[in-house]
Image: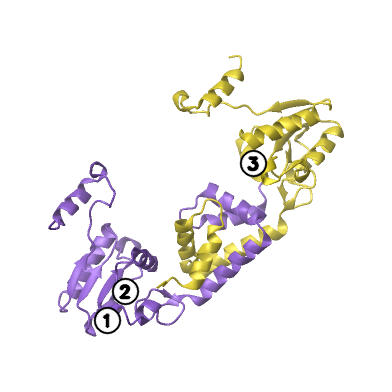
Chain colours: A purple, B yellow
Amino acid sequence: MNYYPKTLGELTAALSLFPGIGKKSAQRLAFYLLNCPKGDVARLLTAIQEARSKIVNCQTCFGMSETPECPICRDQSRDKSIICVLANPNNLFVLESAGVYKGLYHVLGGLLSPLDGIGPEHLRIRELLNRVKQGGVREVILALSSNVEGESTAAYLKRLLDPVRVRISRIASGIPVGGELEYADEITLARSLEGRLKY
Amino acid sequence: MNYYPKTLGELTAALSLFPGIGKKSAQRLAFYLLNCPKGDVARLLTAIQEARSKIVNCQTCFGMSETPECPICRDQSRDKSIICVLANPNNLFVLESAGVYKGLYHVLGGLLSPLDGIGPEHLRIRELLNRVKQGGVREVILALSSNVEGESTAAYLKRLLDPVRVRISRIASGIPVGGELEYADEITLARSLEGRLKY
């Protein structure tokens, strides 16, 4: 016989849809949601609804924004001649928190993945090409993941952008800062050798 | 300059209140909630509200229930002469999933913790005593965590229950099944020696 309350089961199931949350974690979150102060639940529900209703894609870079054009695209102090291409809007905040990049961004909205049925028409590739062709852009930095999808998307973009007079670069692959050489895999080591810099 | 949308920041903050969810995980959950299908969000919001409004404490054992008395307390096939004492209602489902216990439960709603200001009056200890004194109970099993709070709560309950004619037992401490002897700490090993069983 199953004694688990039905509504609790449904809450656990809904929380299991979260990325990286398995059944045990979902149960823990469900118990928390059941027993936490009423104010905390109200705050969460409001935050979800507010965020869903207010956050839109920036019309220029397709990053997340509460205004039609995001604060980065509107910021006159940023270098408009460099565009950093990202797969997802969350990548943008990771790069921003590094605090070294002062150019603009372009969010593709994913990576090419024929197996999942994601072709160039599903990504904002045409929009990127238009931005570059409008002129004033001297460099496009491809900051995509170093996996099969990232590599093939980078190769596709390079082929498209090559006819346009623009410098195309990629973020470096190599051992992470603070990482031990003996724990790096062979492909990463080969990449970090290929990409070696003058010291 | 901070480019993180305010509503997204608030959503991340609300999600950080979840147990075991740090800032990075909260961000991941927030991005999921922003980008997942509308139906999934609606399902989650409904599940939270339904569970909060329908689940109450069972009036007998104080476990979670959708009815005034929970299905376990109402189940005529369960052994009403044994009561297993637990700290929290989630412990109940863990024990139930083990599938070996056929008695009833009593959920204290926490453990004694003077430093956090939790005394006997904050737990359902009086209610436990009343159940045992009503008669028909031959054994009380204390299934509490094996930490300071669990030990002191167990000691307190033993002192209270000793005058009542009832057998008091505790779940065994020892090395986990499948666990390696060399990784067990000294106190656990000492406990598992003390609690050795005839083979």
The CA distance from mark 3 to mark 1 is: 57 Å
Q: Amino acid at mark 2?
A: His
Q: Identify the residue at horizontal 76%, vertical 36% (top origin).
A: B77
Query: Which of the 4 quarters of the picture holds residue A60?
Result: bottom left
**Marked residue chain, label 2:** A
A13 to B79, vertically: above or below = below
Q: Is residue A84 left or right of residue A36?
A: left
Q: Position of residue A169 (x, y in %)?
A: 20, 68
B196 to B99, vertically: above or below = above
Determine whether the residue tagged by mark 2 lies in a helix, strand or loop. Answer: strand
In the orientation shown, which residue stands out farthest toward the left? A198
Q: Position of residue B117 (x, y in %)?
A: 70, 46
Query: Which of the 4 quarters of the picture holds residue B110?
Result: top right
**Marked residue chain, label 3:** B
Depth order, front residue of A7/A80: A80
Residue where numbered disc 2 is placed: A106
Q: Quadrant of the N terminus of chain A?
A: top right
Q: Amino acid at mark 3?
A: Asn
Residue where numbered disc 1 is placed: A131
